[in-house]
Structures are given as C-alpha cells and as structure tokens.
Image (tube, helix red, strand yellow):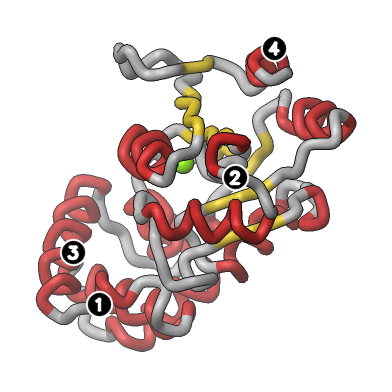
C-alpha cells in the first residue's frame, strides 16, 4: 500500500500557499509567499477554534475547502473572501502540476504481476484523489482499494485507516507493507496498526534509523 503525494505523485509546490499565490495572480491579486504562509498559520489557528480542522474528512469536500480558503483569504486581507474562496477552490487543481515519479508505473505493474494487492491511502478527499490519478494517467483500477479522508472519516496516522484498508483487502497487518514519505503520518501510522512500514526518502533529507528506500524500485528486492 502506498501514500500518494510525495510517494507516487510529485507536485511542483513546496507549500500549498504557492497554489494560493498562483490562483490569486490569475485573479489579478498579488501576495508574497511569506505573507501567504503567515495567513496559513493564522487560518490554521482560527480553523482549530472553529472546529473546522477536526471536520476534515467528515464535512463535504467543497464545503470544507471553501471555508478553509475563505479563512486564508481573510488573513491575506482580502475582503470578498467568501466569493473568492469558491473561485480558488474550483480552480485549485489547475494551479498545480502533478506527475508520477518515473519508476511508479513499472513498479506497480511488477508488484501486480507477482499477484500482490495494491492499495492507496491518502490525506485527501476521495474525489480529489481520483482527479489527481486522472491527471497523472494512473488508472483507478490499478488499486484494489483507495482510501481517502472521507472514506471512514479518519486521517493518517490514525491506525483505524490502515486497519480498514487491510480488512477490505482481506490481509493480516503483518502481510502488508505501507510505503510513504511522511515519518509521522505514514511510517508511524502504519506501524501503529501493525503493518510493515517503509519510508521513501528520495532526497535523503531524513537521517534516521527508520527502514528507508530512495526509490520505489527497491521494494521489488525487499518483497519475496
Ligand atoms: Mg505524502
């Protein structure tokens, strides 16, 4: 099983604020990345107080993101934040370039040829996951299961989301490997549910004693 962003799919932003910047520029509004990052921090504080953050995955996707985007716009000092939030939300995926890492298709195909089941667990709404898979030309049907934040209203690293996926695949935790690029959400989350975990660290940013790979091809030699 795999995480999506940073594991199978790359995107050309380091911070979601960059997507905001691009969306705003298309509307004739200019804000620096530094300003946008501060707006994110303030929006996060308010979203916590409003219990918006805790409704991620539980609330309807558009409704959630409209509220979140309106908060960011408010902290960017943009008055018409509710209307603009709708526009930013609807154009969101037009301002990010997604791509599969070069080895992904080949590795997934080889794992399938070995008769293994494949799964995807991502911190996004199912609709959004499907949209991104479409953009990178990866068939939904490649995966025996796709789990988003709205599937059982749980978010990684909650062990329940991993347990749900393996139950659906009809495998025991020790028969499953989860590969992801986040130590907390992916590696520790999968471990806490009893799965094997592999950290993918393509640029060797983490110096850790966690079980780590640099390229998904390495999985092929780690599985019998
Ligand atoms: Mg990731």
Residue identified by numbered label 4: 221
State the quadrant of the N terminus. Answer: top right
Marks 1, 4: nearer the viewer: 4
Answer whether labels 1 and 3 touch (C-beta < 8 Å).
no
Residue 55, picture quadrant: bottom left
Location of mark 2 (residue): 172
Q: Residue at x 72, y 31 (%)?
A: 104
Q: Is residue 93 visible?
A: no
Q: CA distance from mark 1 to mark 3?
A: 9 Å
Q: Which residue is mark 3?
A: 44
Label at residue 52: 1
Instruction: Verify CB contact (< 8 Å) between mark 1 and mark 2.
Output: no
Disc 1 packing (10 Å; few <14; some 14–19; many ≥20):
some
Q: Nearer the viewer, residue 129 or 144?
A: 144
Give the Cα separation between the discs numbered 2 and 4. Answer: 21 Å
- Please report the residue visible at 45 percent of the width from the left and 56 percent of the height from the top: 123
On the image, the x and y values in percent for residue 29 come to 34, 66
Of marks 3 and 4, the one in the foreground: 4
**Mark 3 burial class by Cα count in 10 Å: few <14, some 14-19, many 20+:** some
Image height check: is 201 above or below 156? above
* Disc 2 residue crowd, few under 14, some 14–19, many 20+, Cα 10 Å: few
Secondary structure type for disc 4: helix
State which tag comes first along the sequence, 3 or 4.
3
Q: Position of residue 57 (x, y in %)?
A: 42, 72
Q: Are marks 2 and 4 in contact (CB under 8 Å)?
A: no
Q: Is residue 76 left or right of residue 94?
A: left
How far apart are the alpha carbons under marks 3 and 4? 42 Å
Q: Residue at 15% of width from left, 81% of height from top? A: 50
């Amino acid at each position: 099983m795999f995480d999506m962003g940073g594991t199978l799919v790359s995107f050309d932003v380091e911070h979601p604020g960059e997507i905001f910047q691009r969306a705003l520029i298309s509307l004739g509004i200019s804000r620096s990345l530094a300003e946008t990052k501060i707006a994110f921090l303030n929006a996060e504080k308010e979203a916590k107080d409003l219990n918006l953050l805790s409704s991620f995955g539980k609330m309807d996707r558009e409704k959630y993101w409209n509220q979140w985007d309106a908060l960011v716009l408010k902290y960017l000092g943009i008055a018409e934040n509710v209307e603009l939030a709708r526009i930013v939300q609807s154009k969101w995926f037009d301002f990010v370039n997604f791509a599969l890492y070069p080895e992904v298709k080949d590795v997934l195909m080889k794992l399938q040829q070995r008769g293994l089941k494949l799964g995807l667990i991502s911190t996004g709404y199912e609709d959004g996951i499907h949209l991104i898979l479409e953009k990178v030309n990866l068939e939904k049907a490649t995966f025996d299961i796709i789990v988003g934040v709205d599937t059982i209203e749980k978010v990684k690293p909650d062990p329940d989301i991993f347990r749900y996926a393996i139950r659906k695949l009809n495998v025991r935790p020790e028969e499953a490997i989860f590969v992801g690029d986040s130590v907390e959400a992916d590696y520790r989350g999968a471990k806490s549910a009893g799965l094997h975990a592999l950290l993918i660290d393509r640029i060797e940013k983490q110096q850790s004693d966690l079980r780590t790979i640099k390229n998904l091809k390495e999985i092929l030699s780690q599985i019998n």
